[in-house]
Every structure is written in C-alpha cells, then in structure tokens.
Image (cartoon, grey):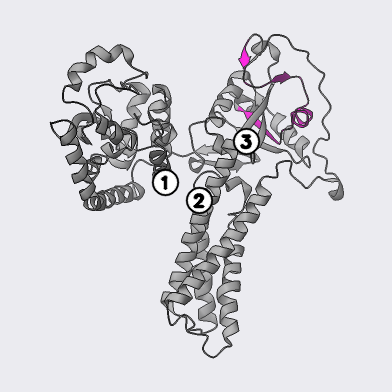
Amino acid sequence: MRHVDSFEIQPPTPPSHNGVPRLAWARARRRVSRWHRPYIAILLLLDFGAAALASFLAVQIFEQADSGFKNSPQAWFYTVAFLLLPLGWVLILWGNRTYDRRYLGLGPDEYKRVIRSGVAVAATVSFLAFATVTSLSRWTVGFALLGAMLLILLGRMIARAGLHTLRRRAGHAGHRMVLVGTLPECLEVFTTVTRHPGVGLVPVAIHLTDGYAAARGMETPVPVYAGRDVLALVREVGGDTIAVCGSASAEPGELRRLAWQLEGSGVDLVVAPQLTDIAGPRVHIRPIEGLPLLHVEEPTLSGPALLLKSLMDRVAAGLGLLLLSPLFAAVALAIRISDPGPVFFRQPRVGHEGRTFRVWKFRTMYVDAEERLAGLVDQNETDGMLFKMKQDPRVFPVGRFLRASSLDELPQLINVLWGEMSLVGPRPLPADDGDFLGDVRRRLLVRPGMTGLWQVSGRSDLSWDEAVRLDLYYVDNWSLAYDLSILWRTVGVVLARKGAY
C-alpha cells in the first residue's frame, strides 16, 4: 500500500484535439492493448479445426454421409465437408462477433453467440440444400453441425481457461487501467476488478477528479495523481485503458471531451457507473433527443424462464439421485463406520418467501456436535450469521473429506426434487440464526441453491457482507445462461476444494 501525504500538482496538458477529425492516414489504428490478437488467431484455428473434426467424425460414422454428392467428383464432397463448411462456420462466427475482444475471456455472452452462430449455420445449410435440390443425409448433417458447435464451445472453454491461467500466474494478456474519479469510487472499482485476477483488469494508477486533498494521508494500492492530462498519464504509467468511475461519468461534457481526446490514441475508454450491482442484460441505452438514457429493467422473478428453471431443476435432481445412488450407499457406509449415528443431518433452513424447510446433508460431525458448539463460539473464524472453523474438532475424519469434496451437499438433490431448493441460488441459512431484515430479506425472493455465486467466488473464505452482496446480485440478475455458467464454474471450484471446510 502507498501512503499519500504530499503531492506536486502539475499543470494540465492541453488535449491533443477537441473532436476535430484528423486525416485518415494520421489516425493511429493499432490499439495499445494487443493481447487479443494472438488469442483470436488461436480461436480461429480451434474453431476451424473443430468444424473439420466434426465433419470427419460424421463421415466415419454414417455410411450415407456423401448422399447428395453421388453424381459429383469425390474431391468436391471432401472440399465441402472439410473446407467450405468449416470456413462457413468461421465466417458466421465472425459475423456474430464471437471474435470481438469485448466478449472474449469473460461472461456467458461469448458462448451465447457461438450457439446463435450454430443456428445460423444450420439455417444456411438447409437453405442451400433446398435451393440446389441436394438430398443430404439428415443424420450426417445434424451430427456434423451439432458436433461442431459442441466442439467449438469446448475449444473456447479450454482457451478461456488457458487465458485465465496466464493472467493469474504471469500477469499478462490483460488491460492496464487508469481509474478516473473520486478516491472512494476508484477504490471501490479497484476492489471489484482485482477480486478475480483471471478477469484481466489491472489498475495501475488513480487520477482524482476532486484534487489531492481528499486523498491526503490515506493509503492507496496504486499511485494517485491529480491535475494531469489523463492521456499523458496513461502513456506515462504504461496503461491501455481509462476507466471513468461513478460520478465522474456524469459530469456534463467531460466524458464526451475525454472520448474525443482518446480518438486515434489506441487507448480504450470504459465507464463504471454507480449501478455496480446491475448486470448488462438489465441495462439498455435508449437515446432520447440525443440524450443517452440508461434504462434499468426489473429483475425477472417470474414467468416462463423461471418455470423452465424449475423444470430443469427437477429433471436434473431426479436423474442425479438415480445415477448417484451407489455413491450415496458408499458414503452412508463410511459415515456409519466412522461414527455411529444417523447418516443424514437435517436442519431447518429458510427458503423461498421465508418458508422454512429441513435441508438434507450427509452428517459430517459427531453426534454431540451441537452440545460442543457453546465452547467453540469464541473461535469462530467468520463474521455474520454463520459459524465456521477451518479445523473444527466436531468434524470426524471422513466428514472432513466429505466437506472438502462437497459430497456432503449431494443429498440436497432431494430438496431440489421436492421444490424446496434449486440447483443454483442463494445459500440457505439456518432458520434460527437471523431475522432476515433489510436487504438480506431480498434473497428470499428466489429458492435457495445447492450452489451459487457465493460458492464459486470463495465460499467460506468470504465475509458475511460479501456473501450477502453476491446473493443479492444473483437475485437481481439471474438467468438460465447465468445458472449454467455458475454450474460450470462450480465443477472447477469443487475439484480445487476452494474455501471448503
């Protein structure tokens, strides 16, 4: 941390221009941040290879693969299957902006665009077959298209995992940001973007809009500046992105002039508004008479999407219980051998709209755990409404393994099947641990989940306030795609045993 005590305010440097167009050949066309170029090249190769591999597998599996090409040279069939079709995939993926650097490496939007591209490829192939009166093998075409889409998605997941690893371990392939705003706003954005290094946002400096006085005597994680030309500061600290934070984005004309100043500089401009807990799908820009208004939609807490979520939960829970029944039997036997007593632990929890239910879990503690709790209260290692200890003496050895591997949570599939819980949602809290007043009560608007945003963001390592913030963010911004993203991230968190004790 840096201690801010004395400063030398430098006079502002005149901006390079004020929105006056420069000659086209004088405009810088290369962006300062270039990590995305080799990454996009890798994605192009992976996508083309995935489509070609899907065609190869379809040809090998189905004997009628070349149906519709019987009267044409065999070379033409192979050209269509292994060159033109994969090339068509790449072009349609490009048209759907799946190579746009703004959607790469973060969030579900990249995968949504791949699926949308798959639908477009299927429609294009169907139209061409109809227009040319070509009788294609439906099974072959269906296998090739669906297989290509799944392989492309898999390739992008692997590429994203590699990108995140590179960012976490080496600090490369990211954006070096200069935060512009008041100190509290900049520090809030700093905390948010540095919480997960895999995101690739690295603040390197703070430029204060209200002068040094507000920061005097305070500790800051990065150098603080004021009264400087922002573009010159970005170049001085080696940045490539300017992030305008909070109220600084609302100053009349300032944001527009900054955008003008950055034209042709290769520096990116992003705005971090004060709507920090509202996700992009709920925010739409609607210009009214030249004034861009941010329209914030209500969260989706009912309707067809919620109905589909409930159906998906029940089906997945039923299949999960059926497939995992041998594992359940093995775990039950291990528990009975470790400590005589009940296999399951059932505790009242608060669920949807405040209704109380009894959660199912494999027992991981000795039968006298509740009696021993009173003597351990002063050793609580977390704040808020939960009691947590990394080395809780009430947990028997097999129970410790069950907790670390999250196997103790699997019986909650019963609660999901009965409609008391969901696969994804806020974590269910004990019924006797709080009053659920104020903001905390809002988390009861949806069913609690076996996993959730809190679990993939730190689990027991999170503070109570941070866990509540994540739960409320999920309630306000949930979607089926977001649920699938959390389920996918849960797999990695469980395998890594992060925050499980």
Q: Using the rendered image of the protein, determine whether residue 475 is visible from the camera's viewpoint.
A: yes
In percent of the image, x 40 and y 33: which residue is there?
Answer: 454
Is 241 colored magenta in this rendering?
yes
In percent of the image, x 33 and y 43: which residue is there?
Answer: 302
Mark 3: amino acid = Gly
Depth order, front residue of 233/394 = 394
Residue 34: image x %, image y %?
70, 45
Depth order, front residue of 328/336 = 336
Mark 2: amino acid = Met
Left or right, residue 154 beside residue 240: left
Disc 1: CA contacts within 10 A as few (<14), some (14-19) or many (>=20):
few
Residue 429: name its quadrant.
Answer: top left
Q: Secondary structure at mark 1?
A: helix
Looking at marks 2 and 1 on the same chain, the residue that comes earlier in the sequence is marked by 2
Q: Secondary structure at mark 3?
A: loop
Residue 261: name its quadrant.
Answer: top right
**Residue position for label 3:** 171
Depth order, front residue of 305/66 = 66
Marks 3/1: CA–CA distance:
24 Å
Label 2 with label 3: CB-CB less than 8 Å: no
* Position of the N terminus by quadrant: top right
**Residue 488: numbered disc:** 1
Q: Which residues are magenta?
A: 218-245
Marks 2/3: CA–CA distance:
20 Å
Residue 44: image x %, image y %?
62, 59
Disc 2: CA contacts within 10 A as few (<14), some (14-19) or many (>=20):
some
Residue 320: image x %, image y %?
26, 50
In percent of the image, x 55 and y 75: which residue is there?
Answer: 81
Is 203 colored magenta in this rendering?
no
Mark 1: amino acid = Trp
**Residue position for label 2:** 157
